[in-house]
Amino acid sequence: MPYQLIWVIFLLPLAAFALTGMGTRLFAKDRPALSGYISVAAIAGSLILSVWALITVLSSTGHELPVPALDWLVVGSLNVQLGMIVDPLTVIMLIVITFVSLMVQLYSQGYMHGDPGYHRYFAFISLFTFSMLGLVLFDNLLITFVFWELVGLCSYLLIGFWFQRPAAANAAKKAFIVTRIGDFGFLAAIILLLSQTGTLDIGELNNLAVTGLLAGSALTWAALGIFFGAVGKSAQFPLHVWLPDAMEGPTPVSALIPAATMVAAGVFLVARMFPLFESSEAALLTVAIIGGVTAIFAATMGLVMTDIKRVLAYSTISQLGYMMLGLGTGGVAVGIFHLVNHAFFKGLLFLGAGSVNHAAGTFDMRKMGGLRKVMPWTFVTFLVASLSMSGIWPLSGFWSKDEILASSLANQPVLFWLAMITVVMTAFYMFRVIFMTFGGHYRGDGHPHESPRVMVLPMVALGVLAAVSGLVNVTGGFGAFLGHGETHGFIEGLFGIFTHPLPWFGLILAGAGILLAYAMYSAQWLSPLRIRRFFAPLHTIFSRKYWMDELYENVITRLVLMKGIFAGFQLFDSHVIDDGINSRIIEQGIVRNFFNSLKFFDEKGVDGAVDGVADTTLGAGKRARKAQTGQLQVYGLFIVLGILAIILLAYFLS
């Protein structure tokens, strides 16, 4: 019964959440590491089963594993089922999510050691992994949206993990609110699709788009609504502002959420619903344009940041733009191929940043330097990831970025040149990090040292994949697995690519960026201070992040929204009350008495009734509150147990 194992992949992290959320706190307070062991064991089990799912799908007819659906919600003619899609796209995402999550959790055993929220951390990580797995597995847009929102909740909990710090609490709220803006578009698309087609089954919707039964403006607006949700979750312009602040969470969280998995959810959603986009030229062009603009827009800010995690954050936004550009110009295989490679090298870069912070006690690159000598493992793995992201042959980033460049050149030449400029910027800011952090002499006050083995080994594992994962498509096998392209020989693909001028051009530009970083931050041939002064206006724009935060906080939130609300009240007061009461009509005693009666009724009747209900509710709440424990993990345990009971009951009764 192989399909039942798919449910095990999905439910293992949920069980780990229940156990680490309450069980270890109650029964193993003197052994905090137990929660980490439980979480790691669960995700390791999901990874093993995900590899099995990959092998099964590879060997199955049609490259899809059938999983019987379970009835979940029946309302009138609407029957929402818990069905799963286990196809090549799904199993690839399962491998990425479970592997990166496993590496992050192993790394966290060392990084989070001694933190008072150790149990809570692993509970949240397990819940997040469960949510991501649900998002990629289920075949109904409504269920996908449920897990989409649950992923957002987990990001709020993890980004604000150290909620005692105001910056972390504010960053969590910012991420939650900004991504909800995008989610409004996703929800609107779901409502539109349901009203137009009567179904939310992803396979049926894609078939309707392919056959032309879903077409016209309805199709375009639905695709754009879905993409708007992806813009928020994948931090695309203009909803990118939450991701840099998300660095306030623990660094392993940065490797998992803003680098490897959660932000990839938007890219995955577009890939899953790609037939809708492919059937709408306007929607597909929008994806490509937003992706290309985001790639270069975020890269400019990465050039000037001095916090190593902030550089990586803007780099992540830029690379996500590359993925969207790949989807918009080359299709599913191109965008998802870069997603996979990016998950490995960007997850490694964030873990490397955490390793540096663990040793030097800071994320400020101006207080680092010379760490290559005392942190050789961190340096080598960080260097491999930087070379890979810069697109240096034959590392993984070269292969996926080259495909994006080729597809954009063939379909959108203007966006191609934006992508090529971004290649130079990417190589420059990544090796600016290398030379400022690991080169030269140590400029800090501490005594840096290599991180413990439990942190180094996951970095080495990710480093290996950052180097070789791109080779899976040297023969065209990755694209063929996803149903795009043809296969050819390994040697032909490995070296034959250089028969075209584009790879040479990309390598020359990447090399130019690395050389420029070396000239400024290592050899000192050029003075960074003089260059900054020469380009002072641009430096100010980039370092102030184009004033996008001020635009959201001061203009949109305070000026437009708040003043709009206050203006509405003032308008009502001046035109309805003042113009009415102070006019000649109010001089008549009967009208004055009428308004006084309304005022009395409003204060004593309406307000009195509302206040009375509120007082009654508060009083009842004070009494009922005594029956509550106030422990979130207890509530979470019973919720999880209830969900498990419902799923098991539905399964055995089906």
Image: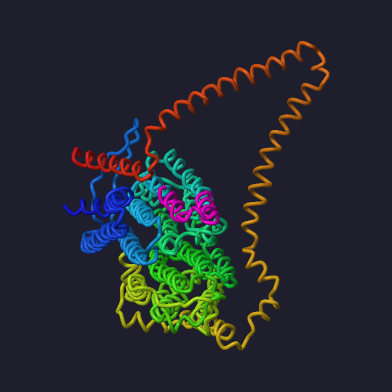
Judged from this view, the residue extending furthest toward the left is: 1
| Left or right of 69 on screen, residue 311 | right
Total number of numbered discs in the rendering: 0
Query: Is any part of residue 57 visible from this angle?
Result: yes
Residue visible at 31% across and 44% down?
637
Judge by depth and name the residue closer to the eye, 236 or 505: 236
Judged from this view, the residue extending furthest toward the top is: 590
Residue 166 forms part of the magenta stretch: yes
Residue visible at 33% across and 65% down?
106
| Left or right of 211 on screen, residue 525 | right
Q: Tell me where residue 467 sits by quadrant.
A: bottom left
Judge by depth and name the residue closer to the eye, 85 or 414: 85
Dominant SS of magenta comes to helix
| Left or right of 484 on screen, residue 249 | right
Q: What stretch is highlighted in magenta?
A: 150-177
Q: Position of residue 444 (x, y in %)?
A: 54, 77
